[in-house]
């Protein structure tokens, strides 16, 4: 018999496709968790979950601005967080990596919520899997804010970053590719950077640290064995565990996005 499930929320809209895809991954994580525990997989055994898809100013642009402009993405995120809190939500996942630059502020404004931190969840997942070195594909804003580096270093994991030119290619893939609906362009640009970063550092794993990147980067076969990790899948798994257990996974289980890339 199920214990009382915790209601959970997803802060999305950055962009909307990524928020919707995150919710899909959350439902998949719940399904896998129920199957693992022998819980009947039926509608009534899924936790209450709410998706807040709100228009949020560009996060990378906000981090590159000075003064009041830098806070522009924060206000709508706080408003959405307030709406989720009013619904009785206990834990919230943010379906945008760059938005975690404002994680500390959102957590401090809503101490009654468990605002999951994507980099902390990814670092815990990698540490549990025995991975000590990885690469990071992300937005300029995520690099600028150091969203992943601190969490990975704290877990004893070395993080390798692309060159400035490669970061520019990633941003083109995100904005001119995924956000503009040109998925083939995005796939080509992301694959080129992933190949170069993995080759340069002899990496066996890469973090796809922007929710847009996994949408355009399915498995590509010419570099078998390279593990591409989708932080959204790991975060969705962590949110599912919060809903069923009120805490993060005790051990590595689920959440891998196993993609082999050219």
Image (cartoon, helix red, strand yellow):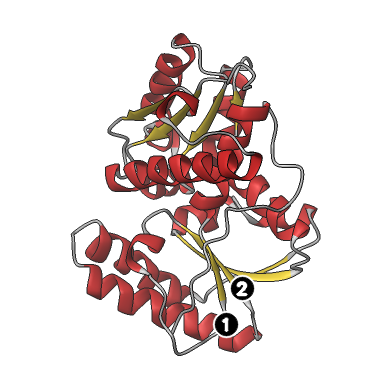
Residue at mark 1 to residue at mark 2: CA–CA distance = 8 Å
Q: Nearer the viewer, residue 244 or 115?
A: 244
* Residue at 48%, 84% in the rendered image: 195
* Residue at 47%, 41% in the rendered image: 26
Where in the figure is residue 89, as x and y percent of width and height? 51, 17
Q: Nearer the viewer, residue 179 or 128?
A: 128
76 to 24, vertically: above or below: above
Where in the figure is residue 217, as x and y percent of width and height? 38, 70
201 to 141, vertically: above or below: below
70 to 92, vertically: above or below: below
Image quarter in which the C terminus is found: bottom left
| Residue 65 visible, this angle | no
Q: Please tell me how crowded label 2 is: few (under 14), some (14-19), or many (20+) other residues with Cα within 10 Å.
A: many
Q: Is residue 175 left or right of residue 138?
A: left
Q: Is residue 62 left or right of residue 202?
A: left
* Residue at 44%, 58% in the rendered image: 139
| Residue 43 visible, this angle | yes
Image quarter in which the N terminus is found: top right
């Amino acid at each position: 018999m199920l214990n009382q499930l915790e209601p959970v929320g997803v802060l999305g809209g950055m962009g909307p496709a990524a928020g919707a895809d995150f919710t899909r991954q959350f439902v998949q994580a719940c399904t896998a968790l129920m199957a693992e525990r022998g819980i009947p997989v039926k509608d009534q055994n899924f936790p209450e979950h709410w998706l807040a898809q709100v228009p949020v100013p560009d996060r990378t642009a906000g981090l590159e601005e000075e003064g009041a402009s830098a806070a522009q993405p924060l206000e709508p995120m706080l408003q959405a967080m307030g709406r989720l809190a009013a619904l009785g939500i206990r834990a919230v996942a943010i379906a945008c990596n760059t938005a975690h630059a404002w994680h500390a502020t959102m957590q401090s404004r809503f101490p009654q919520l468990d605002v999951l931190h994507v980099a902390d969840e990814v670092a815990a997942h990698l540490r549990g899997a025995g991975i000590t070195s990885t690469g990071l594909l992300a937005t300029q804003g995520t690099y600028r804010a150091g969203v992943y580096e601190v969490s990975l270093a704290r877990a004893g994991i070395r993080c390798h970053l692309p060159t400035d030119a490669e970061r520019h290619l990633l941003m083109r893939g995100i904005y001119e590719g995924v956000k503009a609906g040109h998925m083939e362009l995005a796939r080509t640009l992301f694959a080129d950077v992933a190949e170069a970063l993995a080759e340069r550092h002899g990496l066996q794993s890469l973090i796809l640290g922007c929710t847009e990147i996994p949408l355009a980067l399915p498995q590509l076969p010419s570099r078998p064995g390279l593990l591409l990790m989708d932080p959204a899948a790991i975060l969705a798994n962590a949110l599912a565990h919060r809903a069923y257990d009120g805490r993060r996974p005790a051990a590595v289980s689920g959440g891998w996005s196993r993609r082999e890339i050219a």
